[in-house]
């Protein structure tokens, strides 16, 4: 398989190099007539092709295996012996690059020792290619991890309202809903967005004017919005796979430049010449302050004076550019045509059958994440069984059943779903299988049940319909919902750290910290929160984005109009408080439950809501307010915070 992959890499590297050189020759024409974003997307298409180097013939082989168990090549061989009519239309012949036989012949003569591996020139090149790719990735990964560690150690979370309000205003302008952490790092050479999964915006320790701060934040937030760090990762992966190809190095460099050019165009889109000049002055000021090599997996750019001049000229151009969609279509067409026409041959065994594909019975209807987790687990267990019981000759596995068995509505604030899994392994020599386990079984056609049937359970956490896998359990003498099963489940979750033990939480007392889960525009967000103990109550407040403005009142760090506060109505009944809020605040009942009431009103652009809780002697009100345009943001987060409110046991 490595041999085939290496040859595919060489083939794709060669064909894509022609396209890269062709695009570089056309660059002056494209720059004059098209916006930089179109060439930027062409680079990304080429990078994706370089990262996925397999050809059409490879896919034909795989599809042939799936459809009828034979390769397309075998099918064509059978078709050639069939009688044909007088008119036969033949497809255009592909250009085939044949590897010289000298590269596949052993470099040393065979000896009588059959165990001695034969060494070929092609094999040496394969190892050199793979080693080069691993070294390339390792260097970049180590530099990334080192820089990340330095940021964690020496970086400081920016809490300056001056910066945060600029950030919030630009996020609203760009329609960015997610919270963007801002880190001040003294050793940063320039502003940048850093990281893939949890990106942060890094600012050097400098003093910025309002204009500079606006352009810097907008530029980096556009990088974040377009996920440019992910695209840069794609370029690095393409460079890693094709490290031996100078054209790919040039492509990566040009793509980095076009990423910046297209981001500059987005920053000044629709602006007049004075704004464009102000933006170039900001870029020049940053360039003069610090300049060094860029950081891996970041938007920091390491361009010299020549590139900066190119960016300035592109920003100050006033000519309207053409729509570049046709450019993308042409690039995709050329790349497809080259892939169809050029192929490589090495030997008859380009592909090797995998040991197992796995089987899922058609009767299984479990949702995607449950089935995917079950397949991954069974595949792992199958691999271990093949290693530990080699004489059983396992050749495949299958999932026989996967059914939902029980829902735990409340375990330490979590809703848990339990699924029952039955799986089997196929043995070529079922007579050799020793049934050590009392519940193990072997069918006549060689399918082995390695454990007790109906004894494997998968546990998932349910967060508003979104499932996440927690653990697997093996129980052959109890079922979900039973006291024994529940006790074992709690013990397993405590051992994983998902649940805190009574020793950690101090008995029945609430934990000092927790994680709040928000659903914002259909996406799940998690934030660490700390327990605030007030006079007679407690509530979890997120560690970020909120500040205690005055006793019992919290205010958003990004918008002073977003607040929540706690009010205590001493020795009052729920009905009395409801009547008072109806008359004095003009609030209307929005939702009524057995132990609490929700009321709401809207005045102009502001929405005010309150949740009333009744204790033994008093009534507590948790109020929260936010602008109407923040309904999808703060309006969805605040109810989750309010849900954590609790009256002290001594009250």
Image (cartoon, grey):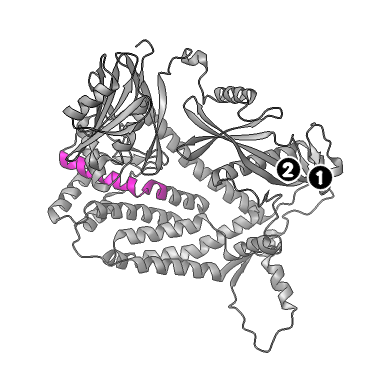
Instruction: Say which of 150 and 98 sits in front.
Output: 150
Label drawn at residue 424? 2
Say which label, 1 or 2, has the lower sequence index: 2
The image position of residue 477, as x and y in percent, is 71, 27
Compared to residue 527, the image places residue 112 above or below, namely below
Compared to residue 5, the image places residue 163 above or below, namely above
Range covered by the magenta-colored residues: 210-232
Instruction: Say which of 630 and 544 sits in front.
Output: 630
Secondary structure mainly formed by the magenta segment: helix
> Looking at the rendering, which quadrant does residue 94 occupy?
bottom right
* Membership of 25 in magenta stretch: no
Q: Is residue 302 visible?
A: no
Secondary structure at badge 1 equals: loop
The image position of residue 199, as x and y in percent, is 37, 39
Cα separation between marks 1 and 2: 10 Å
Residue named by callout 1: 443
Residue 352 falls left or right of residue 409: right
Q: Is residue 593 visible?
A: yes
The image position of residue 492, as x and y in percent, is 59, 25
* Membership of 225 in magenta stretch: yes
Q: Please state, as top left, top right, bottom left or bottom right, where the N terminus lies in the image.
A: bottom right
Dot 2: within a 10 Å radius of its alpha carbon, few (fewer than 14), some, or many (20 or more) residues? many
Secondary structure at badge 2 equals: strand
Q: Badges 1 and 2: C-beta atoms under 8 Å apart?
A: yes
Instruction: Say which of 553 and 186 sits in front.
Output: 553
């Amino acid at each position: 398989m490595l041999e085939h992959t290496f040859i595919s890499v060489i083939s794709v590297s060669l064909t894509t190099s022609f396209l890269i050189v062709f695009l570089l020759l056309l660059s002056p024409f494209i720059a004059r007539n098209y916006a930089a974003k179109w060439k930027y997307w062409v680079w990304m298409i080429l990078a994706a092709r370089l990262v996925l180097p397999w050809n059409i013939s490879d896919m034909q082989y795989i599809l042939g295996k799936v459809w009828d168990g034979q390769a397309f090549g075998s099918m064509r061989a059978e078709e050639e012996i069939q009688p044909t009519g007088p008119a036969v239309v033949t497809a255009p012949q592909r250009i085939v690059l044949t590897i010289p036989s000298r590269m596949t012949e052993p470099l040393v003569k065979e000896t009588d020792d059959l165990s001695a591996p034969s060494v070929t020139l092609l094999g040496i090149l394969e190892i050199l290619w793979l080693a080069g790719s691993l070294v390339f990735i390792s260097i970049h990964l180590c530099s990334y991890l080192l820089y990340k560690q330095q940021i964690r150690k020496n970086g400081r979370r920016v809490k300056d309202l001056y910066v945060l309000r600029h950030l919030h205003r630009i996020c609203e302008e760009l329609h960015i809903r997610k919270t963007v952490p801002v880190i001040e790092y003294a050793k940063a050479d320039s502003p940048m967005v850093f990281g893939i999964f949890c990106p942060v915006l890094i600012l050097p320790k400098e003093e910025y004017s309002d204009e500079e701060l606006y352009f810097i934040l907008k530029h980096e937030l556009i990088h974040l919005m377009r996920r440019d760090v992910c695209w840069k990762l794609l370029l690095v992966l393409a460079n890693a796979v094709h490290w031996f190809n100078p054209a790919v190095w040039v492509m990566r460099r040009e793509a980095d430049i076009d990423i910046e050019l297209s981001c500059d165009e987005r920053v000044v889109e629709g602006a007049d010449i004075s704004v464009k000049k102000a933006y170039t002055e900001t870029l020049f000021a940053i360039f003069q302050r610090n300049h060094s090599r860029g950081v891996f997996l970041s938007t920091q750019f390491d361009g010299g004076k020549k590139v900066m001049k190119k960016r300035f000229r592109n920003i100050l151009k006033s000519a309207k550019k053409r729509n570049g969609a046709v450019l993308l279509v042409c690039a995709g067409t050329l790349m497809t045509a080259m892939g169809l026409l050029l192929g490589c041959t090495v030997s008859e065994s380009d592909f090797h059958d995998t040991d197992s594909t796995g089987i899922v019975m058609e009767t299984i209807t479990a949702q995607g994440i449950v089935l995917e987790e079950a397949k991954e687990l069974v595949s792992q267990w199958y691999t271990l069984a093949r290693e530990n019981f080699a004489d059983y000759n396992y050749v495949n596995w299958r999932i026989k059943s996967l059914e939902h068995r029980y829902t735990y509505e409340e375990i330490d604030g979590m809703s848990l779903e339990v699924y029952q899994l039955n799986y089997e392994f196929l043995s070529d020599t079922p007579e050799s299988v020793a049934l050590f386990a009392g519940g193990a079984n072997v069918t006549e056609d060689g399918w082995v049940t390695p454990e007790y049937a109906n004894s494997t359970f998968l546990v998932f956490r349910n967060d508003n319909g979104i499932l996440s896998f927690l653990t697997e359990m093996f129980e052959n003498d109890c079922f979900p919902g039973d006291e024994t099963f529940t006790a074992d489940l709690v013990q397993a979750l405590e051992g994983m750290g998902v649940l805190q033990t009574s020793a950690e939480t101090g008995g029945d007392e609430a934990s000092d910290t927790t994680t709040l889960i928000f659903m914002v525009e259909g996406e799940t967000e998690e934030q660490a929160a700390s327990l605030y103990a007030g006079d007679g109550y407690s509530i979890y407040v997120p560690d970020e984005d909120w500040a205690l403005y005055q006793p019992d009142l919290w205010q958003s760090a990004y918008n002073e109009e977003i607040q929540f506060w706690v009010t205590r109505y001493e020795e009052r009944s729920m009905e009395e408080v409801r009547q008072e809020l109806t008359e004095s605040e003009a609030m209307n009942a929005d939702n009524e439950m057995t132990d609490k009431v929700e009321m709401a009103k809207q005045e102009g652009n502001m929405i005010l809501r309150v949740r009333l809780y009744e204790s033994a002697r008093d009534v507590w009100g948790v109020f929260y307010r936010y602008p109407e345009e923040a309904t999808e943001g703060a309006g969805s987060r605040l109810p989750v915070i309010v849900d954590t409110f609790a009256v002290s046991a001594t009250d």
